[in-house]
Image (tube, helix red, strand yellow):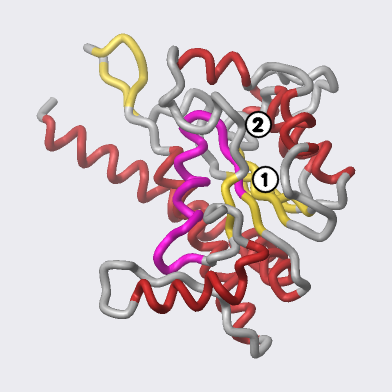
Amino acid sequence: MSDGKLSGRFFDAAIGLLQRVRDEEAESVAAAGTLLADTVASGGRLFAFGAGHSSLAAQDIVYRAGGLALMNLLAVPGVVGVDVMPATLGSALERVDGLASAVLDCSPLRAGDALVIISLSGRNALPVEMALHARTLGVRVIGVTSVAYATETKSRHSSGTYLKDHCDIVLDSKIAVGDAELTLDTVPAPFAPASTVVTAALLQAVMATAAGNLADRGIEPPLLRSGNVDGGHEWNGRVFEEYGDRIFYRQ
């Protein structure tokens, strides 16, 4: 098979998934956008967390041109991203009991805030415990996960539950177990993951909904502008000054 045909198959798979989440998750996206808007309007703060490659979608909505300035990254040492050495340590830390509670107890999260937790499988101890503990703190939780994992894999949390079981709102990415869209007879393993594409799109749809929801209430959404357009830095400086007590990535 030519490279062009493989690339076309991947684009078709990704487009199909995007169409599914657009159509099937519309109600959940609207609810998640409303929850974020409610949080902003009531003086709360916004946080996002993802481990390993799930952190890519979390980082995409933090300090983002065109995004809400109040979205902060919740960092777990050794887990956010794949720059930890060895990279396999990050995967191991996701299975450690107690880590999420320790991180949350040392974080600025408080009652009335909102936390987006991204975990493709939703089965590891870290995201499950994070959702559980965050809700005991009075934090609203939006989970972004593939619900299919809950029926096709075994939970790695002591409760036997998954991320989806401990969220106020769940966004289902529809990604198949294993996160690989393509197969070939000449290739021994499935390949070409699409979870980052779909999850990032889901979250940007939520952020767009939140901004529009705030505007509908007569509240100017605290949006950032690109520093590469004239006046962008000045615009952002005013946003940082107005909302500095709710933005933690500048401290």
SS at badge 1: strand
Residue at 78% of width from left, 22% of height from top?
98
Q: Which residues are magenta?
A: 48-67
Instruction: Specify the farthest residue to the bottom.
Output: 218
Mark 2: few, some, or many residues within 10 Å (few <14, many ≥20)?
A: many
Q: Position of residue 218 (x, y in %)?
A: 65, 90
**Tag 1–tag 2 contact (CB < 8 Å):** yes
Q: Position of residue 65 (x, y in %)?
A: 40, 65
Asked whether, in this view, residue 63 is left or right of residue 209, the answer is: left
Q: Observer-nearest residue: 6 or 91?
A: 91
**Residue type beneath disc 1:** Gly
Asked whether, in this view, residue 26 is left or right of residue 130, the answer is: left
Residue at 63% of width from left, 22% of height from top?
94
Residue at 46% of width from left, 73% of height from top?
237
Q: Observer-nearest residue: 242 or 118?
A: 242
Could you tell me if residue 99 is visible in this image?
yes
Q: Observer-nearest residue: 45 or 61?
A: 45
Q: Is residue 126 magenta?
A: no
**Callout count:** 2
**Residue type beneath disc 2:** Gly
SS at badge 2: loop
Residue at 20% of width from left, 33% of height from top?
6
Q: Position of residue 183 (x, y in %)?
A: 32, 22
Name the residue that disc number 2 marks.
122
Asked whether, in this view, residue 239 is left or right of residue 129, the answer is: left
Could you tell me if residue 165 is visible in this image?
no
Lower sequence index among marks 1 and 2: 2
Name the residue that disc number 1 marks.
143
Q: CA distance from mark 1 to mark 2?
A: 9 Å
Q: Is residue 113 above or below residue 227?
A: above
Q: Quadrant of the N terminus?
A: top left
